[in-house]
Amino acid sequence: MSEDTAASGAEALAESGSSHGGEAGAIVTGGSSHDIPGVAPSGLQIHPMEQFEPARLFGEGEIFWYTPTNVTLWMLLAVLAVALLMVAGTSGRAFIPSRAQSTAELTYGFVRKMVEDVAGKDALGFFPYILTLFLFIVMANFLAILPMSFSTTSQIAVTAVLALAVFLTVTVLGFVKNGAKFLGLFWVSSAPLPLRPILAVIELISYFVRPVSHSIRLAGNIMAGHAVIKVFAGFAGVLGLGSVLPILAITSVLALEVLVAFIQAYVFAILTCVYLKDALHPSH
Amino acid sequence: MEGQLAHIGAGLAAIGSGAAAIGVGNVAGSFLSGALRNPSAAAGQTATLFIGIAFAEALGIFAFLVALLLMFAV
């Protein structure tokens, strides 16, 4: 793994003079030769944000909403991995479960218990939705840790769609279940009367910031972690024998990334449960 | 010149990450001190712990976003 990232760091070092769109993502700490065409730039050049650029899988040209890109490829792989785990894992239906079967069963039970504990028993109708969200995000995050892979959950476009779907579901559900009483979510009846309009404004703002923070938390965490790895890979590309140190750092950051990959999927799912609970029981 | 000012702004926005670190540390530390007083009640509150951490962390992520916008979008 480390060697791969180190190699790609060195590659970024070599092609730093190119006019690729990644120029914007370059941290240039080297000499001023960067501006002169045809002169090889010297010093440390790291492109930590280049890895997040969507690229066409086939051919050249513009990217439309239907174009197969590396984003869609890795989303498809995440879905296939989920299907492999859940369908192939549980197809045996053994009384004494195999490793794959018990992984699938434990995941199912874990998410089901989370929905029941946080959102309440009457939210169990939404359990399949939350399990889908959790499995997709956790698989996309884990696949993104593989060398040379693409992290789809670092794209705000991807996470924003997931978060907006949750936001719309919750808002529509709140109005359908409670009617106008859903607006009681913004009217804090336990506060003194003069304070309530001010609190209502604050509650309204915090309600509409939800999809923003919900999506950017996931994308930001994954993006930041992978950018850190790439920065260390850039160090490994120039240090020669001393690159042992950045490679050790990459290894430990990767271990942290495995933890973050799971925790961010968990947080995304659990916040969905919290929002669901608000929609089902809006009384403040 | 303007681009350099944007870089300074991005660096200032990174202070927000430190503030979020204080917030997350507060949440986790308070949870731990409570959990050690009453370990039997701790297991039921881990979900609350992660919700608290997520809310505190979101504001740090906003600072990170501001830094990214200043670096690449301005």
Image (cartoon, rainbow, N blue to C red):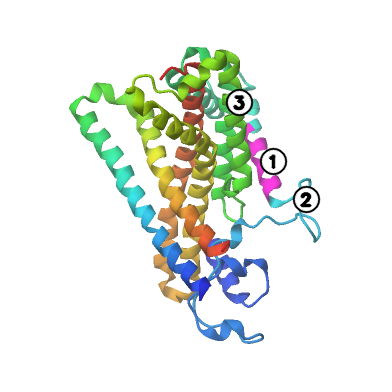
The percent coordinates of residue A272 (x first, y second) are 51, 29
The percent coordinates of residue B15 (x first, y second) are 36, 57
User: Where A10 sits versus A149, above or below?
Assistant: below
For the magenta stretch, what is the residue range? Answer: A71-82
Q: CA distance from mark 1 to mark 2?
A: 17 Å
The subunit carrying tag 1 is A
Q: In the image as oriented, which residue stretches furthest toward the front?
A: A194
Residue at 18 percent across and 27 percent down: it is: B37
Determine which quarter of the picture holds residue A61: bottom right
Q: Out of A175 and A211, give the one closest to the viewer.
A: A175
The disc label shown at residue A76, or none: 1
Residue A115 visible in the displayed image? no
The disc label shown at residue A169, or none: 3
User: Where A239 sits versus A117, above or below?
Assistant: below
Query: Which amino acid lies under the numbered mark 3 shown in the image of this protein?
Result: Thr
Pointer 1 or 2: first along the chain: 2
Circle 1 packing at 10 Å, graded few (<14), some (14-19), many (20+), is some
Circle 2 packing at 10 Å, graded few (<14), some (14-19), many (20+), is few
Residue B15 visible in the displayed image? yes
The percent coordinates of residue A260 (x first, y second) are 45, 44
Circle nearer the viewer, 1 or 3: 3
The residue identified by callout 2 is: A64
Q: Out of B61 and A184, give the one closest to the viewer.
A: A184
Do tag 1 and tag 3 residues touch (Cβ < 8 Å)?
A: no
Query: Which amino acid lies under the numbered mark 2 shown in the image of this protein?
Result: Phe
Determine which quarter of the picture holds residue A174: top right
Pointer 3 or 2: first along the chain: 2
